[in-house]
Image: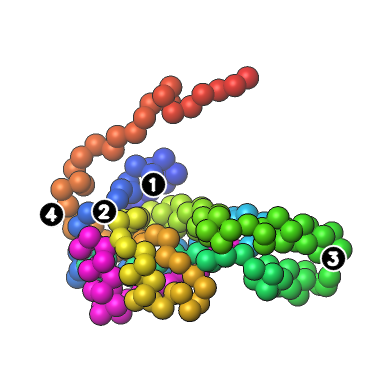
Amino acid sequence: MALDNLSELMNWRYATKKMDPAKAVAEGDVSRILDAIRMAPTSSGTQPFEVFVITNSEVRAEIRKVAWDQAQITDGSHLLVFAAWDNYTAPRIDAVVSQMEDERGGANPLLSQYYDNLKANYLPREADVNYEHAARQAYIALGFALMAAAEAQVDSTPMEGFDPAEVDKILGLKDKGLRSVILLPLGYRDTSGDWLLPMKKVRKSEEKMFQRID
């Protein structure tokens, strides 16, 4: 079934509760989803997170144990783990600037001033404040991943139901200066066994969701 527009994609996708372990997502589709994540906007272009793409069955089984035993983690073919920076640091921000300078043809005084001001604001803050800010950037990218998956008609299930500290241990994130934010299994729905699939998608009405201020 081809989906022709954004509205159809949004109505087709849902938080898949049961995936078919016999069906694997093609690497080409995974690459398109990852590219949507890579191209997503983030605050000041810092991209303060990394994404772990896990197909290893043993690692996914370990994560499932600390994620409320949610079967999609192992029944899907790929598990994406979004992991945010544990803090903003001068070297991390300087690396962003260096890449911009390298790819844009050299130093730019306006760019340097902008990121100097950014460091002056971010670096004195508590690490947890900076982590929460970085995590919100990961959520922006998550939204792009969900729509890219829908466009490829790949099912996905965003998950906050897990023990972040345990996932951090499994993946060795602390040593990388990262903290897990959200999980996203990718796979294909089991149309015969997913209790949520036949249910109507329920959302607030426009009147309840939006308030216009003219």
Inter-mark Cα distance, 4 to 3: 58 Å
Look at the picture and state if 161 lies above or below 103: above
Name the residue furthest top: 214
The answer to whether the residue labelled 2 contacts the one labelled 3, judged by CB atoms less than 8 Å apart, is no
Q: Which mark, by number, is residue 192? A: 4
**Mark 1 residue element:** helix
**Mark 2 residue element:** loop
Colouring rule applied to residues: rainbow
Q: Is residue 179 visible?
A: yes
Q: Position of residue 110 (x, y in %)?
A: 84, 59
Which of marks 1 and 3 precedes in the sequence? 1
Look at the picture and state if 30 lies above or below 17: below
Crowding at label 4, few (<14), some or many (≥20) Cα neighbours within 10 Å?
few
Q: Which residue is mark 2?
A: 16
Q: Which residue is mark 3?
A: 108
Which amino acid lies under the numbered mark 3 shown in the image of this protein? Answer: Asn
Which of marks 1 and 4 precedes in the sequence? 1
The residues colored magenta run: 47-71
Inter-mark Cα distance, 4 to 2: 12 Å
Which amino acid lies under the numbered mark 2 shown in the image of this protein? Answer: Thr
Name the residue furthest left: 192
Q: Position of residue 52 (x, y in %)?
A: 43, 72
The answer to whether the residue labelled 2 contacts the one labelled 1, judged by CB atoms less than 8 Å apart, is no
The structure residue drawn at horizontal position 33% and vertical position 56%, both measured from the top left corner, is 159
The structure residue drawn at horizontal position 29% and vertical position 77%, both measured from the top left corner, is 59
Q: Position of residue 195 (x, y in %)?
A: 15, 48
Inter-mark Cα distance, 2 to 1: 14 Å
